[in-house]
Image (cartoon, grey):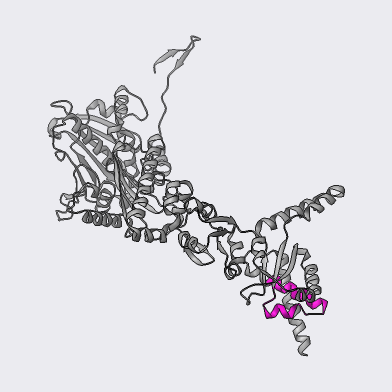
Amino acid sequence: MPLRHDSADHATTDRTFQVDLRGLVDLLSHHLYSSPRVYLRELLQNAVDALTARHSLEPGAPADAFGIRLYADGSVVRVEDDGVGLTEADVHTFLATIGRSSKRAEQIADQRADFIGQFGIGLLSCFLVADEIHVVSRSARTPDAPAVEWRGRGDGSYAVRTLPASARPRPGTTVTLTPRADAGEWTRPAQVHALARHFGSLLRHPVTFDDGTGGPGGQGAPVNPDPAPWARTHPTPGARSRALAAYGEEVFGFTPLDTIELDLPAVGLKGIACVLPEAIPAGRRHGHRVHVKGMLLSEQAEEILPDWAFFVRCVVDAESLRPTASRESLYEDDTLAAVRDALAERLRAWIARAAASDPELLGRFLQVHHLAVKSLAVHDDEIMRMLLPWLPFETTDGHATLDEFARTHRTVLVTSSVEEFRQVAAIASAAGLGVVNGGYTYDRELVHRLPEIRPEVSVADLDPATLTAHLDPVDRETELAAAAYLAQARDALAVFDCDVALRTFQPASAPALLLDSREARHERTRSQLAREQQGGVWGDILGALRQEAPRAQLILNQLNPLVRTAVTIGEPELARTSAEALYGQAAMLSRRPLRPAESSLINRSFLDLLAHALRKDS
């Protein structure tokens, strides 16, 4: 072993790492690659890189002069290319050493933009399905170069020898695998053909497949017979649109609502975005199909589009995006960020064109994907101004666009929660108030921006006092007659910090309205906890402050026959029970979660009223 001396003149022995190849392959299979099937992608990538280098060496050669040939008959898998080939030195650089830097490797690294993969590490993936890899290559860089043979085994051993040029008459490389018995799932002829089409359908070099049977489906069958659909010519724009939609349906399994062509010349990106025909949950994102230089990189690349663009699925082919080490996702860098922004702009432009020239398409799109557009409009002023009048909202007039709603209501009130809207919707509608449910994601913020495009309309948050002011007071005699009942009701409901009032409002079928916002409940709970944790003077002060906390209001409807009967009850216990029952019924109609004390009150009041009815009948 070579010796060297350190600064203290102590002899130090240089040693090399011992690489356990089986352990490395296990690491690749469990932590780098998602499936053993990637072995074929890696072989195709190596072949494409070799063809790219061959075209650089012979730039005048026709594009289809060199190709890739696959063969699989169940006993072997073979991938042959007409690429630049390897010299004996290349074999030692790329196949015999893992992780060692060399000047040649550094030169190739400087030209990475022309290549997809990295030959040595990619070839290791073949050990996922085979115990031996056989490579025969002849370089196109050196005239009359000999052929070079490399045999690598799963135990880490290898052998290299030169062969006469006749062993491979033309430049290029042939990689032959003898599959293991447990790898049949990935190396059967039909599976090899399917994987080749899956990964290489958009490759720019001709790829053929042979299954050794001589049948029409195997004897030199083309893997990628057609160019990418966006690279083809069509007689009319309509024919092109239909062809792109058909390709989107073939790839994704659904008929797109529309297709959006994507073209970013700066990074050599082309492709399509397919608008989903059905809505999906806001937080759920579909992956996109990304090819790099024609080779499929990932079917689940979420990072290519921003979060708000969950209404489309894309298939793109790019030149300048960087794959990660596994070549199964994209490397997050400035280029990817710029591509994401540029594609987002293309989607915005499509929405703008639909709004300006295709109202029918826009209507169908918004009917399905209004939530996605709302999330975009919150952060995009142009989209907001363009589409806000078209977006549907839940209102006291039913589901309507803001443009329709603003024609009827010059003052638009918006609730802060779904619960609040459900409490007041029927009464507000009967009172002629225009209320929008602002409890859904983005809705309240967007409704408040309505005056930016409709200056004649004013928007305000719904305040309980606003609604109460639109409820008609009862006459003085009726109020005095009900005073005793109202006092007993307030006493019964004091535990819920609830005041009780008597009004008249429509619909008459509603006996009571409970006005109690979530914020008010939280504030009362917070004050109660703080008061319980403090004693003495602080407790008294907090108790005084607690009186200023917003209280719930139970508004009894004098127009309702049940209420008119209840306010005449003279028996104190029955009056309290009826007030509790009215409170419980109003709380359930609000559809908010009931507190344990409220559930208990509802059960108790029901049983008490039932017992009273039974005693009366007996």
Residue 392 in picture, x, y percent from top left: 46, 60
Q: Which residue sits at x=57%, y=59%? A: 413
Magenta stretch secondary structure, dominant: helix
Quick one: quadrant of the N terminus? top left
Give 281 or 508, whichever is nearer the viewer.
508
Residue 372 in picture, x, y percent from top left: 44, 54
Asked if residue 413 lies left or right of residue 306, the reply is: right
Give 494 or 513, whichever is nearer the viewer.
513
Quick one: quadrant of the C terminus? bottom right
Magenta stretch: includes residue 577: yes
Residue 289 in picture, x, y percent from top left: 34, 48
Give 88 or 388, whichever is nearer the viewer.
388
Magenta stretch, residue numbers: 557-584
* Residue 198 appears in the picture as rendered: yes
582 to 130, vertically: above or below = below
* Residue 593 appears in the picture as rendered: no
Magenta stretch: includes residue 396: no
